[in-house]
Image (cartoon, helix red, strand yellow):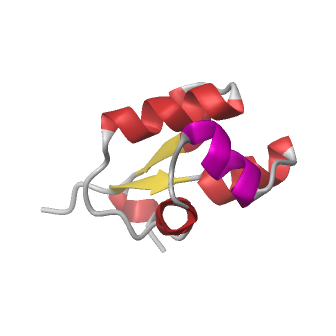
Amino acid sequence: MEYGTIKIKLDELIEKVGISKNKLSHRAEMQRSQINRYCNNEISRLDTDVLARLCTAMNCDIGDLLEFVPPAERE
């Protein structure tokens, strides 16, 4: 049975907020390579600490960062 997926919208949010990945990496105390993995949806397990850092650094809600994509809508 297909359950859908969670899409990480960090790349869209970075563009919307107008922050650079370098500035975000400093604010969130994360490595730029880790931010790139989140931007490219290359994360297999979400880390709640990382999500909290990103939401705090970008002053956003978790819903701004994550989206549930039902099975019928997957690309």
Q: Is there any visible trace of residue 15 in the rendered image?
A: yes
Residue 15 is situated, as x and y percent measured from the top left of the image, at 81, 54
Residue 5: % across, % down = 34, 57
Whole-percent x and y of residue 9?
A: 59, 52
Tell me where residue 37 appears, x and y as whole percent: 47, 68
At x 82%, y 48%, the residue is: 19
Q: Nearer the viewer, residue 75 or 67?
A: 67
The answer to whether residue 72 is magenta is no
From the viewer's perspective, is residue 33 above or below residue 24? below
Q: Quadrant of residue 42?
A: bottom left
**Measuring 27% from the left and 63% from the top, which residue is drawn there?**
44
16 or 70: which is nearer to us?
16
Asked whether residue 63 is in view, the answer is no
In terms of depth relative to the viewer, which is nearer, 2 or 7?
7
Which span of residues is magenta-colored?
A: 22-28
In the rendered image of this protein, does residue 21 appear above or below residue 17?
A: below
Query: At 12% from the left edge and 62% from the top edge, which residue is drawn?
Result: 1
- Left or right? Give the position of 7 relative to 60: left
Please give left or right for residue 13 compared with residue 34 in the image: right
Q: Using the rendered view, name the quadrant where residue 45 is placed.
A: bottom left
Q: Against 62, is 23 above or below?
A: below
Query: Image point 48% across, 74% down: which residue?
Result: 75
Image quadrant where residue 54 sits: top right
